Amino acid sequence: MKIKFILKFLLLILLLGCLGAGALYYYLNQQVQQTLLISKPQLLTLGKGQSARKILVELEQQKIIGDIIALKILLKLKPQLAKFKAGTYELLPGMQTQQLLDLLVSGKEKLFSISLVEGLQWREWELQLKSQEHLVFDATTDAGIAALISDLPGQSIEGWLLPDTYHFATGTNAFTVISIAHQKMRQYLEEQWHVRALDVPYANSYEGLIMASIIEKETAVPSERPRIAGVFVNRLNLNMRLQTDPTVIYGLGPDFDGDIKRKDLKTPTPYNTYVIKGLPPTPIAMPGKLSIAAAFNPLATNDLYFVARGDGSHQFSETLQQHNQAVKQYILKK
């Protein structure tokens, strides 16, 4: 009888234990399925060395999650869920507590982006990088840029960064973005150099990059870029000056007031293609892929001139007489 009693007692204890474990599992499962108490996206930054329990307390105090007793129990039962990684994370409305825990363990930080636009100069990109609050632009950045420039032809970073949208985690040094943009430019430049028209008059790919920057500044109409490239290549082949206003403006630098004047065209600078022959010493802007492709594969025409029509497009001419007539029509309105 005693043995039967003991067995029944043990079975009862086991049953109660199972019921208790089941109730605990149900309770914990209900808690981790609770949604976060936020109505709009929020950023959460975890520093290195912060304990999971302390982070949960802070989340409770910030009213992002509710009662954390169940979560503390869960972290005890599943210690792998307490291995939060430092970083900045995005919390979204509707996110469940379990998803929050998984996110903090995964280390998948919120990525921010910056779009560096073709046709702008390095000084404009630099200001944009410095104004991005999630990027770090400091002495380390400056040192990296200086080292990069020291290895570049012309000792200038102008033109050497590929326009694109770049993604990064908060706290990323700006030089990381700059370095990626530079590598992407080098890669694309070499790709286009290997598929270039064999008769382009460039000694190397860098001269093609310089030409691409001029094309970029001359037109925003994609279909015109190969034809404008053809005009400049024709002029180079005939030993004619390029005579392109954007190079003059670049040479004037901060002194340019937005209105190019006749005296500006006569002011000697290394970039004034009304004065110098051939290409300027460095690019004058950051060219995009279309302009680079056009520089290496210009359209074969007899055009030597073009003038803006006033609608963003250009009128092309083969002779000076045709060009003068186009200037009268579109510039002088005669």
Image (cartoon, rainbow, N blue to C red):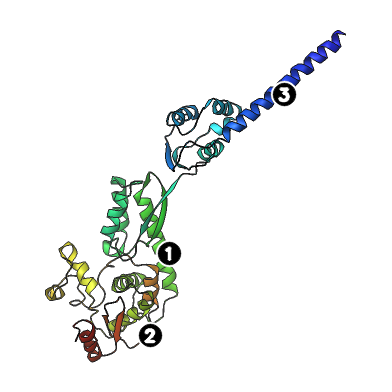
Amino acid under label 2? Ala
Identify residue type, mark 1.
Gln
Percent coordinates x, y for residue 182 in the rendering:
37, 59
Looking at the image, the residue that sits furthest to the top is 2
User: Which residue corresponds to mark 2?
Assistant: 300
Q: Earlier in the sequence, mark 1 or mark 3?
A: 3
Tell me: residue 28, above or below residue 139.
above
Q: CA distance from mark 2 to mark 1?
A: 26 Å
Of the residues shown, which amino acid type is indicated by label 3? Cys
Q: Earlier in the sequence, mark 2 or mark 3?
A: 3
Q: Nearer the viewer, residue 125 or 112?
A: 112
Q: Is residue 30 above or below residue 196?
A: above
Disc 2 crowd rating (10 Å Cα; few below 14, some 14-19, many 20+) is few
Compare residues 1 and 227 and report the one nearer the observer. 1
Q: Secondary structure at mark 2?
A: loop
Residue to which mark 3 is pinned: 18
Considering the numbered disc 3 on the image, is that residue within a helix, a strand or a loop? helix
Q: From the top left corner, tell me how far across and down residue 77 is, in percent.
A: 61, 27
Q: Residue furthest front?
A: 39
Q: Is residue 91 above or below residue 266?
A: above
Name the side, left or right, on which 105 lies relative to 290.
right
